[in-house]
Image (cartoon, helix red, strand yellow):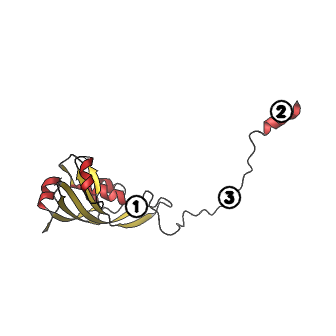
Amino acid sequence: MKQGIPKTIKLFKFASRGGIFSHQYQVRDFPRISTIASNHNSKVSVTISFSLEGEIPCITGEVEIDLELDCQRCLDVVKLHLEPKFKLAFLKNEEQGETLDASFETILNADEEFSTIEFITDEVLISVPMAPLHEHKCLSYQDTQPINEQKKENPFAILKQLKKKE
């Protein structure tokens, strides 16, 4: 049964119960994301399920979010639709990961509890491009001025003149 996501993830407790959580947020609910996005009222859909793989607590989930970011080429708004999916296993030590399915991304984590908002924020920020750009060539980016070639002077030309004087 799906239910709203609690504010704090209790990793082993949720994993041992096999909980499935789902919730609709807004971009403004994620402080680190809202600092880079201009669409604070857009919806963010999150579904997270917990499981135990042996003794290892795991989280599988997906986020669906539309972001309006600044294009790094023209500084106009670029709209991105992101659907990050994640499959994480939280290990207490590296040896635990040897028996785990390779499809899991492993995280060394001793924390039993952590913030849901911060966890989701991290997963979204990982999927945001380093430099968001429009797919088309931005008009304001194209330079209309012709490039004037400047003749570069050889920095050692003065030495040539000194050599002639000798």
Instruction: Kindly identify the amino acid type of the residue bearing the numbered disc 2.
Output: Leu
Q: Earlier in the sequence, mark 1 or mark 2?
A: 1
Give the position of the N terminus as an image quadrant: bottom left
Instruction: Kindly identify the amino acid type of the residue bearing the numbered disc 1.
Output: Leu
> Would you name the residue on which mark 1 appears?
69
Q: Which image quarter: residue 143?
A: bottom right
> Would you name the residue on which mark 2 appears?
162
Q: Which mark is residue 147?
A: 3
Check whether the beta carbons of the residues at disc 1 and disc 2 lie within 8 A of each other: no
Q: Select label 3 or label 2 by which is in front.
A: 2
Instruction: Estimate the x, y position of residue 46 in percent, counting from the top left.
Output: 24, 64
Helix, strand or loop at mark 1 = strand
- Front-lying residue, 56 or 20: 56
Instruction: Estimate the x, y position of residue 56 in percent, counting from the top left.
Output: 19, 54
Is residue 10 visible from the viewing direction of this image?
Answer: no
Q: Earlier in the sequence, mark 1 or mark 3?
A: 1
Q: CA distance from mark 1 to mark 3?
A: 31 Å
Disc 1 residue crowd, few under 14, some 14–19, many 20+, Cα 10 Å: many
Q: What residue do we see at 44% from left, 61% from top?
A: 132
